[in-house]
Image (tube, coloured by chain):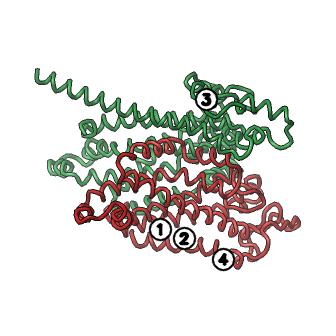
Amino acid sequence: MGCQVVAGGTGSVVTGFILRRLASGLVVLAIVSMGAFFLMALIPGDPAAVMAGPGASADQIGAIRSQLGLDQPLLARLWLWLTGLAHGDLGRSITFGQPVLQLLAQRLPVTFGLSALAMVWTLLFGIGSGAIAALKRGTAVDHTIMTAATIGVSIPNFWLGFLLVMVFSVDLMWLPTGGYVRFGEDPWQWFRYMLLPSVSLALLQIALLSRITRGALLDVLQQDYVRMARARGLSPARIFFRYALLNAAVPIVTVIGAILSLMLSGAVVVETVFSIPGIGRLMATSILSRDYPVIQGALIVTASLLILVNLLMDLAYAWLNPRIRYA
Amino acid sequence: MGSPTLAVGVVLAALFLGLAVFADVVAPGSTSHINIPGAFQAPSWTHPFGTDNFGRDIFGRVVHGARISLAIGLATVVLTGLFGTILGVVAGYVRPVDGAVMRTMDALNAFPGVMLAIGIAAALGPGASSIVIALTAVYIPGTARLIRSSTLLLREAEFVLAARAIGAGPLRIIFVHILLNVLTPLLVQLTFVFAYAILAESALSFLGLGLPLPTPSLGNVIADGRDYIREAPWICLCPGLTLSAAVCGLNFLGDGLRDLLDPRLKVSP
Protein backbone atom coordinates (compact mmCIF):
# COMPACT_ATOMS: atom_id res chain seq x y z
CA MET A 1 0.00 0.00 0.00
CA GLY A 2 2.79 2.35 1.04
CA CYS A 3 4.63 1.41 -2.13
CA GLN A 4 1.57 2.29 -4.24
CA VAL A 5 1.34 5.73 -2.64
CA VAL A 6 5.02 6.37 -3.30
CA ALA A 7 4.70 5.14 -6.89
CA GLY A 8 1.65 7.36 -7.47
CA GLY A 9 3.49 10.35 -6.00
CA THR A 10 6.48 9.74 -8.24
CA GLY A 11 4.20 9.42 -11.26
CA SER A 12 2.48 12.71 -10.58
CA VAL A 13 5.81 14.47 -9.99
CA VAL A 14 7.10 13.14 -13.32
CA THR A 15 3.84 14.06 -15.07
CA GLY A 16 4.04 17.54 -13.54
CA PHE A 17 7.63 17.90 -14.77
CA ILE A 18 6.64 16.82 -18.30
CA LEU A 19 3.62 19.15 -18.32
CA ARG A 20 5.71 22.10 -17.09
CA ARG A 21 8.32 21.49 -19.78
CA LEU A 22 5.59 21.05 -22.42
CA ALA A 23 3.89 24.32 -21.41
CA SER A 24 7.21 26.16 -21.49
CA GLY A 25 7.96 24.67 -24.93
CA LEU A 26 4.56 25.82 -26.24
CA VAL A 27 5.12 29.37 -24.96
CA VAL A 28 8.52 29.47 -26.65
CA LEU A 29 6.98 28.07 -29.86
CA ALA A 30 4.33 30.82 -29.80
CA ILE A 31 7.03 33.51 -29.41
CA VAL A 32 9.09 31.86 -32.19
CA SER A 33 6.05 31.89 -34.53
CA MET A 34 5.45 35.57 -33.94
CA GLY A 35 9.19 36.30 -34.22
CA ALA A 36 9.30 34.64 -37.65
CA PHE A 37 6.26 36.68 -38.70
CA PHE A 38 7.75 40.00 -37.59
CA LEU A 39 10.96 39.23 -39.45
CA MET A 40 9.17 40.43 -42.57
CA ALA A 41 8.43 43.70 -40.77
CA LEU A 42 12.20 44.34 -40.55
CA ILE A 43 12.45 44.69 -44.33
CA PRO A 44 13.02 48.39 -45.00
CA GLY A 45 10.55 50.01 -47.40
CA ASP A 46 8.02 47.95 -49.36
CA PRO A 47 8.67 44.21 -48.75
CA ALA A 48 6.85 43.29 -51.99
CA ALA A 49 9.15 45.56 -54.04
CA VAL A 50 12.24 44.17 -52.29
CA MET A 51 11.14 40.58 -52.98
CA ALA A 52 10.23 41.32 -56.60
CA GLY A 53 13.75 42.67 -57.12
CA PRO A 54 15.02 45.61 -59.13
CA GLY A 55 13.34 46.11 -62.48
CA ALA A 56 10.07 44.41 -61.48
CA SER A 57 6.88 45.87 -62.94
CA ALA A 58 4.12 47.36 -60.78
CA ASP A 59 1.94 44.34 -61.65
CA GLN A 60 4.59 41.87 -60.45
CA ILE A 61 5.01 43.82 -57.21
CA GLY A 62 1.23 43.93 -56.80
CA ALA A 63 0.96 40.17 -57.37
CA ILE A 64 3.54 39.47 -54.62
CA ARG A 65 1.81 41.96 -52.33
CA SER A 66 -1.53 40.21 -52.66
CA GLN A 67 0.04 36.70 -52.53
CA LEU A 68 1.63 37.52 -49.18
CA GLY A 69 -1.39 39.48 -47.95
CA LEU A 70 0.77 42.60 -47.57
CA ASP A 71 -2.20 44.74 -48.61
CA GLN A 72 -3.97 43.80 -45.37
CA PRO A 73 -3.52 45.38 -41.91
CA LEU A 74 -0.67 43.98 -39.75
CA LEU A 75 -2.94 42.32 -37.17
CA ALA A 76 -5.01 40.63 -39.88
CA ARG A 77 -1.78 39.30 -41.44
CA LEU A 78 -0.58 38.06 -38.06
CA TRP A 79 -3.88 36.24 -37.55
CA LEU A 80 -3.69 34.71 -41.04
CA TRP A 81 -0.07 33.66 -40.39
CA LEU A 82 -0.89 32.02 -37.05
CA THR A 83 -4.01 30.24 -38.33
CA GLY A 84 -2.03 29.14 -41.39
CA LEU A 85 0.68 27.72 -39.12
CA ALA A 86 -1.93 25.84 -37.10
CA HIS A 87 -3.01 24.19 -40.37
CA GLY A 88 0.56 23.51 -41.50
CA ASP A 89 0.45 26.30 -44.08
CA LEU A 90 3.75 28.18 -44.21
CA GLY A 91 2.87 30.15 -47.33
CA ARG A 92 4.10 29.79 -50.89
CA SER A 93 7.60 30.23 -52.25
CA ILE A 94 8.00 33.22 -54.57
CA THR A 95 10.77 31.53 -56.59
CA PHE A 96 9.46 27.98 -56.81
CA GLY A 97 5.73 28.72 -56.69
CA GLN A 98 5.30 25.69 -54.43
CA PRO A 99 4.01 25.55 -50.83
CA VAL A 100 6.93 26.24 -48.48
CA LEU A 101 6.09 23.21 -46.33
CA GLN A 102 6.33 20.95 -49.39
CA LEU A 103 9.72 22.42 -50.34
CA LEU A 104 11.02 21.95 -46.82
CA ALA A 105 9.61 18.42 -46.56
CA GLN A 106 11.47 17.45 -49.75
CA ARG A 107 14.78 18.77 -48.40
CA LEU A 108 14.51 17.89 -44.73
CA PRO A 109 15.50 14.20 -45.17
CA VAL A 110 18.71 15.29 -46.95
CA THR A 111 19.70 17.55 -44.05
CA PHE A 112 18.63 14.88 -41.54
CA GLY A 113 20.90 12.32 -43.22
CA LEU A 114 23.84 14.73 -43.24
CA SER A 115 23.26 15.75 -39.61
CA ALA A 116 22.82 12.12 -38.53
CA LEU A 117 26.18 11.13 -40.03
CA ALA A 118 27.81 14.21 -38.51
CA MET A 119 26.23 13.28 -35.16
CA VAL A 120 27.77 9.79 -35.41
CA TRP A 121 31.26 11.34 -35.84
CA THR A 122 30.51 13.84 -33.06
CA LEU A 123 29.49 11.21 -30.52
CA LEU A 124 32.21 8.76 -31.53
CA PHE A 125 35.17 11.15 -31.64
CA GLY A 126 33.87 13.79 -29.21
CA ILE A 127 33.14 11.36 -26.38
CA GLY A 128 36.12 9.17 -27.31
CA SER A 129 38.72 11.96 -27.31
CA GLY A 130 37.21 13.59 -24.20
CA ALA A 131 37.33 10.25 -22.35
CA ILE A 132 40.97 9.67 -23.34
CA ALA A 133 41.88 13.20 -22.22
CA ALA A 134 40.17 12.65 -18.85
CA LEU A 135 41.84 9.27 -18.31
CA LYS A 136 45.25 10.74 -19.26
CA ARG A 137 44.70 13.93 -17.25
CA GLY A 138 47.70 16.23 -17.07
CA THR A 139 49.73 14.28 -19.64
CA ALA A 140 50.89 15.33 -23.09
CA VAL A 141 47.96 13.37 -24.57
CA ASP A 142 45.48 15.44 -22.55
CA HIS A 143 47.15 18.73 -23.53
CA THR A 144 47.26 17.70 -27.20
CA ILE A 145 43.58 16.75 -27.28
CA MET A 146 42.46 19.93 -25.51
CA THR A 147 44.64 22.14 -27.73
CA ALA A 148 43.26 20.33 -30.79
CA ALA A 149 39.74 20.93 -29.44
CA THR A 150 40.38 24.68 -29.17
CA ILE A 151 41.78 24.72 -32.70
CA GLY A 152 38.76 22.65 -33.82
CA VAL A 153 36.27 25.28 -32.60
CA SER A 154 38.26 27.98 -34.39
CA ILE A 155 38.20 26.63 -37.94
CA PRO A 156 35.37 27.92 -40.16
CA ASN A 157 33.50 24.89 -41.49
CA PHE A 158 33.30 26.20 -45.07
CA TRP A 159 37.08 26.63 -45.15
CA LEU A 160 37.55 23.14 -43.72
CA GLY A 161 35.25 21.90 -46.49
CA PHE A 162 37.48 23.53 -49.13
CA LEU A 163 40.59 21.98 -47.56
CA LEU A 164 39.03 18.51 -47.50
CA VAL A 165 37.95 18.86 -51.14
CA MET A 166 41.45 20.02 -52.06
CA VAL A 167 43.09 16.99 -50.45
CA PHE A 168 40.61 14.13 -50.84
CA SER A 169 38.80 15.10 -54.04
CA VAL A 170 41.24 17.16 -56.12
CA ASP A 171 44.63 15.68 -55.13
CA LEU A 172 43.85 12.09 -54.11
CA MET A 173 40.60 11.81 -56.10
CA TRP A 174 39.13 9.44 -53.52
CA LEU A 175 35.83 11.22 -52.97
CA PRO A 176 33.48 13.42 -55.03
CA THR A 177 33.87 17.22 -54.78
CA GLY A 178 30.15 17.70 -54.19
CA GLY A 179 26.65 16.63 -55.13
CA TYR A 180 24.18 14.17 -53.67
CA VAL A 181 22.90 10.61 -54.10
CA ARG A 182 19.81 9.47 -52.20
CA PHE A 183 20.43 6.86 -49.49
CA GLY A 184 17.62 4.69 -50.88
CA GLU A 185 19.21 4.78 -54.33
CA ASP A 186 22.70 3.62 -53.35
CA PRO A 187 23.74 3.65 -49.64
CA TRP A 188 27.46 3.32 -50.44
CA GLN A 189 27.44 6.26 -52.88
CA TRP A 190 25.38 8.26 -50.37
CA PHE A 191 28.12 7.64 -47.79
CA ARG A 192 30.87 8.65 -50.23
CA TYR A 193 29.06 11.89 -51.06
CA MET A 194 28.25 12.64 -47.41
CA LEU A 195 31.65 11.79 -45.89
CA LEU A 196 33.48 15.09 -46.45
CA PRO A 197 30.43 17.31 -45.71
CA SER A 198 29.65 15.39 -42.52
CA VAL A 199 33.25 15.71 -41.31
CA SER A 200 33.24 19.46 -42.10
CA LEU A 201 29.98 19.77 -40.18
CA ALA A 202 31.09 17.64 -37.23
CA LEU A 203 34.51 19.11 -36.40
CA LEU A 204 33.22 22.01 -34.30
CA GLN A 205 30.82 19.73 -32.40
CA ILE A 206 33.53 17.07 -31.85
CA ALA A 207 35.73 19.73 -30.29
CA LEU A 208 32.93 21.02 -28.05
CA LEU A 209 31.81 17.57 -26.95
CA SER A 210 35.38 16.52 -26.25
CA ARG A 211 35.80 19.39 -23.77
CA ILE A 212 32.41 18.72 -22.15
CA THR A 213 33.05 14.96 -21.86
CA ARG A 214 36.47 15.55 -20.31
CA GLY A 215 35.06 17.98 -17.75
CA ALA A 216 32.12 15.70 -16.89
CA LEU A 217 34.32 12.62 -16.53
CA LEU A 218 36.90 14.40 -14.36
CA ASP A 219 34.05 15.50 -12.14
CA VAL A 220 32.66 11.96 -11.83
CA LEU A 221 36.06 10.29 -11.41
CA GLN A 222 36.60 12.38 -8.26
CA GLN A 223 33.32 11.24 -6.66
CA ASP A 224 33.36 9.08 -3.51
CA TYR A 225 31.56 6.14 -5.14
CA VAL A 226 34.31 5.87 -7.78
CA ARG A 227 36.99 5.90 -5.07
CA MET A 228 34.96 3.27 -3.24
CA ALA A 229 34.75 1.12 -6.36
CA ARG A 230 38.53 1.42 -6.76
CA ALA A 231 39.04 0.48 -3.11
CA ARG A 232 36.84 -2.58 -3.64
CA GLY A 233 39.26 -3.69 -6.32
CA LEU A 234 36.98 -3.33 -9.37
CA SER A 235 38.83 -3.28 -12.68
CA PRO A 236 39.54 0.18 -14.20
CA ALA A 237 37.50 -0.78 -17.29
CA ARG A 238 34.49 -1.73 -15.17
CA ILE A 239 34.78 1.47 -13.11
CA PHE A 240 35.05 3.57 -16.27
CA PHE A 241 32.14 2.05 -18.20
CA ARG A 242 29.83 1.05 -15.35
CA TYR A 243 30.27 4.08 -13.07
CA ALA A 244 32.05 7.00 -14.71
CA LEU A 245 30.79 7.09 -18.30
CA LEU A 246 27.17 6.37 -17.35
CA ASN A 247 27.11 9.23 -14.84
CA ALA A 248 28.99 11.58 -17.14
CA ALA A 249 26.22 10.99 -19.72
CA VAL A 250 23.95 13.36 -17.78
CA PRO A 251 25.76 16.63 -18.67
CA ILE A 252 26.51 15.25 -22.16
CA VAL A 253 22.79 14.71 -22.88
CA THR A 254 22.03 18.33 -21.95
CA VAL A 255 24.21 19.64 -24.78
CA ILE A 256 22.80 17.40 -27.54
CA GLY A 257 20.14 20.06 -28.34
CA ALA A 258 22.82 22.75 -28.58
CA ILE A 259 24.93 20.48 -30.80
CA LEU A 260 22.00 19.88 -33.13
CA SER A 261 21.38 23.62 -33.28
CA LEU A 262 25.00 24.21 -34.28
CA MET A 263 24.70 21.47 -36.89
CA LEU A 264 21.63 23.01 -38.52
CA SER A 265 23.48 26.35 -38.57
CA GLY A 266 26.52 24.70 -40.09
CA ALA A 267 24.35 22.87 -42.64
CA VAL A 268 23.54 26.18 -44.38
CA VAL A 269 27.21 26.72 -45.15
CA VAL A 270 28.33 23.09 -45.64
CA GLU A 271 25.43 22.25 -47.97
CA THR A 272 26.32 25.32 -50.02
CA VAL A 273 30.00 24.31 -50.25
CA PHE A 274 29.19 20.72 -51.29
CA SER A 275 26.06 21.49 -53.39
CA ILE A 276 23.81 19.28 -51.24
CA PRO A 277 20.10 19.91 -51.86
CA GLY A 278 19.10 20.18 -48.19
CA ILE A 279 17.22 22.74 -46.15
CA GLY A 280 20.42 24.75 -45.52
CA ARG A 281 21.19 25.23 -49.21
CA LEU A 282 17.54 26.06 -49.86
CA MET A 283 17.84 28.81 -47.26
CA ALA A 284 21.13 30.07 -48.72
CA THR A 285 19.67 30.28 -52.24
CA SER A 286 16.50 31.89 -50.89
CA ILE A 287 18.58 34.78 -49.52
CA LEU A 288 19.88 35.57 -52.99
CA SER A 289 16.42 35.33 -54.56
CA ARG A 290 14.85 37.26 -51.62
CA ASP A 291 12.38 34.41 -51.10
CA TYR A 292 11.35 35.50 -47.60
CA PRO A 293 8.47 33.01 -47.14
CA VAL A 294 11.02 30.18 -47.53
CA ILE A 295 13.41 31.84 -45.06
CA GLN A 296 10.54 32.29 -42.58
CA GLY A 297 9.40 28.70 -43.10
CA ALA A 298 12.91 27.25 -42.68
CA LEU A 299 13.36 29.27 -39.49
CA ILE A 300 10.11 28.15 -37.96
CA VAL A 301 10.53 24.48 -38.92
CA THR A 302 14.10 24.26 -37.59
CA ALA A 303 13.21 26.17 -34.41
CA SER A 304 10.22 23.87 -33.79
CA LEU A 305 12.43 20.83 -34.30
CA LEU A 306 14.96 22.18 -31.84
CA ILE A 307 12.27 22.97 -29.27
CA LEU A 308 11.07 19.35 -29.61
CA VAL A 309 14.59 17.94 -29.35
CA ASN A 310 15.33 20.10 -26.30
CA LEU A 311 12.09 18.91 -24.70
CA LEU A 312 13.06 15.28 -25.35
CA MET A 313 16.56 15.95 -24.00
CA ASP A 314 15.07 17.52 -20.84
CA LEU A 315 13.00 14.36 -20.37
CA ALA A 316 16.04 12.17 -20.98
CA TYR A 317 17.96 14.32 -18.51
CA ALA A 318 15.26 13.84 -15.90
CA TRP A 319 15.19 10.11 -16.61
CA LEU A 320 18.97 9.83 -16.24
CA ASN A 321 19.12 12.08 -13.18
CA PRO A 322 16.31 11.43 -10.65
CA ARG A 323 17.33 14.49 -8.59
CA ILE A 324 15.87 16.70 -11.34
CA ARG A 325 12.49 14.93 -11.20
CA TYR A 326 12.13 15.50 -7.49
CA ALA A 327 13.44 19.07 -7.47
CA MET B 1 48.15 24.99 -19.03
CA GLY B 2 46.70 28.29 -17.74
CA SER B 3 49.51 30.72 -18.45
CA PRO B 4 50.83 29.24 -21.74
CA THR B 5 47.24 29.26 -23.04
CA LEU B 6 46.83 32.88 -22.04
CA ALA B 7 50.24 33.80 -23.51
CA VAL B 8 49.49 32.15 -26.88
CA GLY B 9 46.05 33.75 -26.86
CA VAL B 10 47.42 37.21 -26.09
CA VAL B 11 50.10 36.94 -28.81
CA LEU B 12 47.71 35.69 -31.53
CA ALA B 13 44.96 38.14 -30.60
CA ALA B 14 47.46 41.04 -30.43
CA LEU B 15 48.86 40.09 -33.85
CA PHE B 16 45.37 40.06 -35.34
CA LEU B 17 44.42 43.34 -33.67
CA GLY B 18 47.74 44.91 -34.73
CA LEU B 19 47.30 43.85 -38.36
CA ALA B 20 43.72 45.11 -38.41
CA VAL B 21 44.42 48.45 -36.70
CA PHE B 22 47.56 49.21 -38.72
CA ALA B 23 46.20 47.79 -42.00
CA ASP B 24 47.02 50.99 -43.91
CA VAL B 25 50.65 50.85 -42.73
CA VAL B 26 51.14 47.09 -43.12
CA ALA B 27 49.48 46.89 -46.53
CA PRO B 28 49.25 50.34 -48.10
CA GLY B 29 47.48 50.87 -51.41
CA SER B 30 44.15 49.82 -52.86
CA THR B 31 42.85 46.34 -52.06
CA SER B 32 40.68 46.27 -55.17
CA HIS B 33 43.27 47.38 -57.76
CA ILE B 34 42.96 44.97 -60.70
CA ASN B 35 46.18 43.81 -62.38
CA ILE B 36 45.31 40.92 -64.72
CA PRO B 37 48.91 40.26 -65.91
CA GLY B 38 49.88 39.70 -62.26
CA ALA B 39 47.06 37.20 -61.56
CA PHE B 40 47.61 33.86 -59.77
CA GLN B 41 51.11 34.65 -58.45
CA ALA B 42 52.25 32.22 -55.76
CA PRO B 43 53.30 33.64 -52.35
CA SER B 44 56.56 35.60 -52.55
CA TRP B 45 58.33 38.46 -50.72
CA THR B 46 56.38 40.97 -52.83
CA HIS B 47 53.05 39.23 -52.25
CA PRO B 48 53.33 37.19 -49.01
CA PHE B 49 49.93 35.52 -49.62
CA GLY B 50 50.14 35.57 -53.44
CA THR B 51 47.66 37.23 -55.80
CA ASP B 52 44.14 36.26 -56.85
CA ASN B 53 42.44 35.86 -60.23
CA PHE B 54 42.30 39.66 -60.65
CA GLY B 55 45.96 40.07 -59.67
CA ARG B 56 44.96 41.67 -56.35
CA ASP B 57 47.37 41.27 -53.43
CA ILE B 58 45.74 38.73 -51.09
CA PHE B 59 47.77 39.85 -48.04
CA GLY B 60 46.41 43.37 -48.46
CA ARG B 61 42.86 42.07 -48.83
CA VAL B 62 43.26 39.82 -45.77
CA VAL B 63 44.67 42.61 -43.60
CA HIS B 64 41.95 45.08 -44.66
CA GLY B 65 39.34 42.32 -44.40
CA ALA B 66 40.57 41.62 -40.86
CA ARG B 67 39.89 45.26 -40.00
CA ILE B 68 36.26 44.90 -41.13
CA SER B 69 35.85 41.57 -39.32
CA LEU B 70 37.36 43.15 -36.20
CA ALA B 71 35.04 46.16 -36.37
CA ILE B 72 31.98 43.93 -36.79
CA GLY B 73 33.17 41.62 -33.98
CA LEU B 74 33.81 44.55 -31.61
CA ALA B 75 30.46 46.21 -32.35
CA THR B 76 28.71 42.86 -31.75
CA VAL B 77 30.59 42.42 -28.46
CA VAL B 78 29.66 45.92 -27.23
CA LEU B 79 25.96 45.56 -28.11
CA THR B 80 25.75 41.97 -26.82
CA GLY B 81 27.47 42.99 -23.57
CA LEU B 82 25.19 45.98 -23.12
CA PHE B 83 21.84 44.35 -23.89
CA GLY B 84 22.76 40.94 -22.47
CA THR B 85 23.75 42.54 -19.17
CA ILE B 86 20.67 44.76 -18.95
CA LEU B 87 18.32 41.86 -19.73
CA GLY B 88 20.18 39.41 -17.47
CA VAL B 89 20.26 41.78 -14.47
CA VAL B 90 16.62 42.78 -14.95
CA ALA B 91 15.51 39.13 -15.23
CA GLY B 92 17.57 38.08 -12.23
CA TYR B 93 16.72 41.00 -9.98
CA VAL B 94 13.17 41.99 -10.94
CA ARG B 95 11.43 38.64 -10.47
CA PRO B 96 8.02 39.56 -12.04
CA VAL B 97 9.61 40.12 -15.47
CA ASP B 98 11.94 37.10 -15.26
CA GLY B 99 9.57 34.68 -17.04
CA ALA B 100 8.78 37.03 -19.93
CA VAL B 101 12.45 37.98 -20.51
CA MET B 102 13.77 34.43 -20.29
CA ARG B 103 11.04 32.91 -22.51
CA THR B 104 11.89 35.55 -25.13
CA MET B 105 15.57 34.61 -24.78
CA ASP B 106 14.59 30.92 -25.10
CA ALA B 107 12.71 31.76 -28.29
CA LEU B 108 15.73 33.57 -29.77
CA ASN B 109 17.88 30.65 -28.70
CA ALA B 110 15.49 28.17 -30.32
CA PHE B 111 16.59 29.32 -33.78
CA PRO B 112 19.83 27.83 -35.08
CA GLY B 113 22.29 30.74 -34.68
CA VAL B 114 23.49 31.22 -38.25
CA MET B 115 19.93 30.69 -39.59
CA LEU B 116 18.57 33.43 -37.32
CA ALA B 117 21.43 35.72 -38.34
CA ILE B 118 20.65 34.95 -42.00
CA GLY B 119 16.96 35.69 -41.48
CA ILE B 120 17.64 39.05 -39.84
CA ALA B 121 20.51 40.05 -42.14
CA ALA B 122 18.48 39.03 -45.22
CA ALA B 123 15.53 41.11 -44.04
CA LEU B 124 17.65 44.17 -43.22
CA GLY B 125 19.67 43.92 -46.43
CA PRO B 126 23.44 43.54 -46.89
CA GLY B 127 25.71 45.78 -44.85
CA ALA B 128 27.84 45.93 -41.73
CA SER B 129 25.04 47.21 -39.48
CA SER B 130 22.72 44.36 -40.56
CA ILE B 131 25.37 41.80 -39.65
CA VAL B 132 26.02 43.44 -36.29
CA ILE B 133 22.29 43.52 -35.43
CA ALA B 134 21.86 39.90 -36.60
CA LEU B 135 24.84 38.59 -34.62
CA THR B 136 23.86 40.58 -31.53
CA ALA B 137 20.43 38.91 -31.62
CA VAL B 138 22.15 35.51 -31.80
CA TYR B 139 24.53 36.08 -28.87
CA ILE B 140 22.29 38.07 -26.47
CA PRO B 141 20.43 35.00 -25.07
CA GLY B 142 23.61 33.21 -23.89
CA THR B 143 24.97 36.38 -22.30
CA ALA B 144 21.64 37.29 -20.67
CA ARG B 145 21.32 33.77 -19.23
CA LEU B 146 24.84 33.90 -17.79
CA ILE B 147 24.30 37.33 -16.20
CA ARG B 148 20.88 36.28 -14.88
CA SER B 149 22.30 33.22 -13.11
CA SER B 150 25.11 35.32 -11.58
CA THR B 151 22.55 37.94 -10.51
CA LEU B 152 20.33 35.28 -8.91
CA LEU B 153 23.28 34.09 -6.81
CA LEU B 154 24.47 37.60 -5.97
CA ARG B 155 21.08 38.97 -4.88
CA GLU B 156 21.02 36.37 -2.08
CA ALA B 157 24.71 36.82 -1.19
CA GLU B 158 25.41 37.99 2.36
CA PHE B 159 27.04 41.26 1.34
CA VAL B 160 24.01 42.16 -0.76
CA LEU B 161 21.61 41.26 2.05
CA ALA B 162 23.76 43.38 4.40
CA ALA B 163 23.69 46.30 1.96
CA ARG B 164 19.92 45.99 1.73
CA ALA B 165 19.66 45.84 5.54
CA ILE B 166 21.51 49.16 5.90
CA GLY B 167 19.12 50.77 3.46
CA ALA B 168 20.79 50.52 0.04
CA GLY B 169 18.24 50.97 -2.76
CA PRO B 170 17.79 48.57 -5.71
CA LEU B 171 19.73 50.83 -8.12
CA ARG B 172 22.71 51.08 -5.75
CA ILE B 173 22.66 47.30 -5.22
CA ILE B 174 22.51 46.66 -8.99
CA PHE B 175 25.21 49.16 -9.99
CA VAL B 176 27.60 48.84 -7.06
CA HIS B 177 27.23 45.25 -5.92
CA ILE B 178 25.83 43.17 -8.79
CA LEU B 179 27.25 44.77 -11.94
CA LEU B 180 30.77 44.96 -10.53
CA ASN B 181 30.64 41.29 -9.60
CA VAL B 182 29.32 40.03 -12.93
CA LEU B 183 32.12 41.76 -14.83
CA THR B 184 34.47 38.75 -14.60
CA PRO B 185 32.16 36.14 -16.16
CA LEU B 186 30.98 38.79 -18.63
CA LEU B 187 34.53 39.53 -19.77
CA VAL B 188 35.23 35.83 -20.39
CA GLN B 189 31.89 35.35 -22.18
CA LEU B 190 32.49 38.37 -24.42
CA THR B 191 35.92 37.09 -25.45
CA PHE B 192 34.20 33.97 -26.80
CA VAL B 193 31.41 36.06 -28.37
CA PHE B 194 34.14 38.06 -30.15
CA ALA B 195 35.67 34.85 -31.54
CA TYR B 196 32.32 33.38 -32.63
CA ALA B 197 31.16 36.71 -34.11
CA ILE B 198 34.26 36.85 -36.34
CA LEU B 199 33.60 33.24 -37.44
CA ALA B 200 29.88 33.89 -38.04
CA GLU B 201 30.63 37.09 -39.97
CA SER B 202 32.89 35.12 -42.28
CA ALA B 203 30.11 32.56 -42.82
CA LEU B 204 27.58 35.32 -43.64
CA SER B 205 30.06 36.98 -46.02
CA PHE B 206 30.68 33.61 -47.65
CA LEU B 207 26.92 33.25 -48.20
CA GLY B 208 26.78 36.70 -49.82
CA LEU B 209 25.23 38.54 -46.88
CA GLY B 210 28.35 40.49 -46.00
CA LEU B 211 29.58 43.84 -47.21
CA PRO B 212 29.03 44.54 -50.91
CA LEU B 213 31.96 43.51 -53.14
CA PRO B 214 34.75 44.47 -53.76
CA THR B 215 35.12 45.47 -50.07
CA PRO B 216 37.16 42.62 -48.59
CA SER B 217 36.19 40.66 -45.47
CA LEU B 218 37.87 37.44 -44.38
CA GLY B 219 34.78 35.42 -45.44
CA ASN B 220 34.48 36.78 -48.97
CA VAL B 221 38.26 36.61 -49.58
CA ILE B 222 38.11 32.86 -48.74
CA ALA B 223 35.02 32.45 -50.92
CA ASP B 224 36.84 34.15 -53.82
CA GLY B 225 39.37 31.32 -53.84
CA ARG B 226 36.97 28.39 -54.02
CA ASP B 227 36.89 28.26 -57.82
CA TYR B 228 40.69 28.18 -58.01
CA ILE B 229 41.51 25.52 -55.42
CA ARG B 230 43.37 23.44 -58.00
CA GLU B 231 45.40 26.18 -59.72
CA ALA B 232 45.92 28.63 -56.87
CA PRO B 233 45.21 27.04 -53.48
CA TRP B 234 46.83 29.99 -51.62
CA ILE B 235 43.84 32.24 -52.45
CA CYS B 236 41.75 30.10 -50.13
CA LEU B 237 44.44 28.80 -47.75
CA CYS B 238 46.10 32.04 -46.57
CA PRO B 239 42.97 33.96 -45.52
CA GLY B 240 41.54 30.79 -43.91
CA LEU B 241 44.69 30.27 -41.88
CA THR B 242 44.65 33.92 -40.78
CA LEU B 243 41.01 33.69 -39.75
CA SER B 244 41.51 30.39 -37.88
CA ALA B 245 44.62 31.72 -36.09
CA ALA B 246 42.76 34.87 -35.01
CA VAL B 247 39.73 32.95 -33.71
CA CYS B 248 42.01 30.38 -32.07
CA GLY B 249 43.91 33.21 -30.35
CA LEU B 250 40.67 34.68 -29.00
CA ASN B 251 39.53 31.24 -27.79
CA PHE B 252 42.86 30.67 -26.04
CA LEU B 253 42.57 34.14 -24.54
CA GLY B 254 39.06 33.34 -23.26
CA ASP B 255 40.21 29.99 -21.81
CA GLY B 256 43.25 31.62 -20.22
CA LEU B 257 41.23 34.49 -18.74
CA ARG B 258 38.67 32.07 -17.34
CA ASP B 259 41.38 29.91 -15.74
CA LEU B 260 43.03 33.00 -14.33
CA LEU B 261 39.91 34.73 -13.05
CA ASP B 262 37.89 31.72 -11.94
CA PRO B 263 40.01 28.60 -11.30
CA ARG B 264 36.87 26.61 -10.39
CA LEU B 265 35.85 26.62 -14.07
CA LYS B 266 39.29 25.53 -15.28
CA VAL B 267 39.03 23.34 -18.39
CA SER B 268 42.64 22.23 -18.40
CA PRO B 269 44.46 20.62 -15.47
Looking at the image, tell me whether mark 2 or mark 4 is earlier in sequence order: 2
**Above or below B29: residue A239:** above
Instruction: Please identify the quarter of the rendering in which residue A286 is found.
Output: top right
Q: Mark 4 — residue? A: B22
Q: For residue B13, which numbered disc appears in the image? A: 2
Q: Is residue B241 visible?
A: no
Question: Do callouts 2 and 1 mark residues in contact (Cβ within 8 Å)?
Answer: yes
Left or right: residue A71 versus residue B252 is: right
Give the color of chain A as drawn: green
Looking at the image, tell me whether mark 2 or mark 1 is earlier in sequence order: 2
Tell me what residue is drawn at x 86 percent, y 36 percent.
A57
Crowd rating for badge 1 (residues with CA inside 10 Å; few <14, some 14–19, many 20+): many
Crowd rating for badge 2 (residues with CA inside 10 Å; few <14, some 14–19, many 20+): many
Give the color of chain B as drawn: red
What amino acid type is highlighted by mark number 2? Ala
In the image, are marks 1 and 3 on the same chain? Answer: no
Disc 2/disc 1 C-alpha distance (Å): 8 Å
Question: Do callouts 1 and 3 mark residues in contact (Cβ within 8 Å)?
Answer: no
